[in-house]
Image: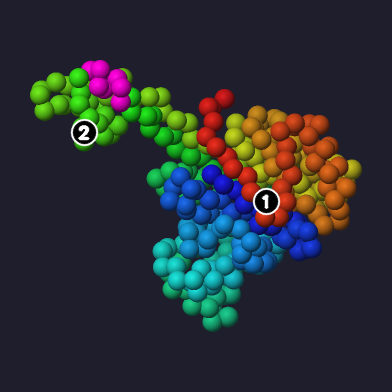
Amino acid sequence: MNFTFLGTGAGLPAKERNVTSIAVRFPEYDGNLWLFDCGEGTQRQILYTPVKLTKLKVIFITHLHGDHLFGLPGVLGSRSFQGSESPLLVIGPRGLKQYVWTALRASGTHIRYPLKVREISESGTVFEDEHFIVSAEALEHGISCFGYRIVEKDLPGELLVEKLKKAGIPPGPVYQKFKEQSEVLLSDGRCFKSAPFVGERKKGRRVAIIGDTRPCEQSIKLAKHTDLLIHEATFRDQDKAMAWNYRHSTSVQAAEIAREASAGALILTHLSSRYQKEEQAALLNEAKKVFGSTLLARDLWGYELKRQPRR
């Protein structure tokens, strides 16, 4: 599971940080791609990364503020221009459907692939496929805004081939049945339970991506026991009054969420352009004092989340 931070700034594009978008690629699942938010300039940022719009399957929008949304029509159009014909699903708050179709119609943009926009208005499961379940929780940002929790389904354990051989079961198509069936009947009449010949199931990864919000219980719920929490950190701790007024979080508050939720790692993103490099370093350091496993995202930076034993 590979994360590419296409934009890590808040509000307005800056020279160092574009506005928000995160690409999540799944090399283990045919290279499929998801986007979380799609700020202005996202498609240009993609040009400098391994991200391919032809692999894009789902776009999750946290809320309808422009720095999270204004790049969406361009991405939708470019995906069509590049010849994609596979379906695309866009998920986000109410009003998203009107925004998407108005922008496409007004600009005369013709989409050559099946496009579906799914609006959400309450917490719960918003997406599920063969490998993942994605749930949403309403956050506290003044307008309808959601955070997302990605849960990878547990994977089957490895087939214990040597154990099968010792039991006198020769290699062949029958081995696959031991992973698919609870019992296997051999051609010689012997019947075996499958469980002793399959290793322990591999635990799926868990990730939370928190959109713009004040600190709230919903954020802790989304982040609970995740392997990775990606959280907005618009302000430094010294500016927490401003963060509260604008319904955002500070770096320290994001770290407190990670600590309380027992997350494995924290990545801070969505930084205000008022902070230059020295203050960005201070923002990170004050968060690390609260939660040591904290990283600060930068534009075009990649992060790989490998499978790890569940804590």
Which label lies toward us, 1 or 2? 2
Closer-to-camera residue (125/6):
6
Q: Residue at the spot x=64%, y=67% of the render? A: 44
| Quarter of the rendering containing residue 20 | bottom right
Q: Which residues are magenta?
A: 161-167
What residue appears at the point 44 percent right and 68 percent down from the top-left corner?
Answer: 84
For marks 1 and 2 on the same chain, the one whose residue lies earlier in the sequence: 2
The residue under label 1 is which amino acid type?
Trp
Q: Which secondary structure lies at badge 1?
A: strand
Q: Is residue 234 left or right of residue 180?
A: right
Q: In the rendered structure, does residue 5 fall within the stretch colored magenta?
A: no
Category of crowding for the residue at label 1, using alpha-carbon neighbours closer than 10 angstroms: few (below 14), some (14–19), many (at least 20): some
Residue 5, placed above or below residue 13? above
**What mark, if any, has residue 172 been given in the picture?**
2
Circle 1 sits on which residue? 301
Nearer to us in this view, 50 or 3: 50
Residue 281's tag is none
- In the image, residue 162 lies in the stretch drawn in magenta: yes
Q: Residue at x 66, y 35 (%)?
A: 265
Say whether residue 65 is visible.
Answer: no
CA separation, marks 1 and 2? 44 Å
Q: Is residue 41 left or right of residue 119?
A: right
Residue 130 in the image, given as x and y percentages of width and height: 39, 45
Residue 35, percent from left and from top: 57, 56
Callout 2 amino acid? Gly
From the viewer's side, name the closer residue of 62 and 78. 78
Determine the residue located farthest toward the left in the rendered image: 188
Instruction: Find residue 284 and report its image quarter.
Output: top right
Please state the horizontal and vertical placement of residue 46, each as a whole percent of the image: 61, 62
Q: Secondary structure at mark 2?
A: loop
Q: Answer left or right for 107 relative to 114.
A: right
